[in-house]
Amino acid sequence: MHIKRCDRIWPEPGASLGPSGISEYAVFTDHETNALFSVGNQGEGASPRDPGHRPPIKKWQAYGTGIMKTNADRSPKTTEKVFYLE
């Protein structure tokens, strides 16, 4: 379900991540639970909230409302980092 929805709208929001300092971005889905998880690299000086202010990202977030957990402003709920290995 998530893959088809993302494929319909992805090129526009995807193109806005690079100028926001985000690279190597991936979205994963668990087909059993329908859960989504995304991860990406953030350049120095970039805030993880930077892309969320761009119209293509706002459109993508609005498109995902109803199939993923979101905040009142439609931004995705964030998760807590458990560990990180470099």
Image (cartoon, helix red, strand yellow):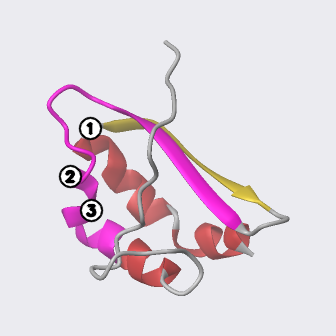
Disc ID at residue 50: 2
Disc ID at residue 52: 3
Residue 74 shown in magenta: no
Displayed quadrant of residue 42? top left
Disc ID at residue 21: 1
Displayed quadrant of residue 78? bottom left
Q: Provide the residue span drawn in magenta.
A: 35-58
Q: Amino acid at mark 3?
A: Gly
Classed neighbour count for the residue bearing mark 3: other residues with Cα under 10 Å, few (<14), some (14–19), many (≥20): many
Callout 1: helix, strand or loop? loop
Q: Residue furthest right?
A: 32
Q: Amino acid at mark 2?
A: Asp
Classed neighbour count for the residue bearing mark 1: other residues with Cα under 10 Å, few (<14), some (14–19), many (≥20): some
Camera-side residue of 86 and 13 = 86
Callout 3: helix, strand or loop? helix
Residue contact at pointers 2 and 3, CB within 8 angstroms: yes
Q: Residue furthest bottom?
A: 66
Residue 38 shown in magenta: yes
**What residue sits 59% from the left and 81% below the top?**
67
Q: Nearer the viewer, mark 3 or mark 1?
A: 3
Q: From mark 2 to mark 1, how far is it between C-alphas? A: 8 Å
Residue contact at pointers 2 and 1, CB within 8 angstroms: yes
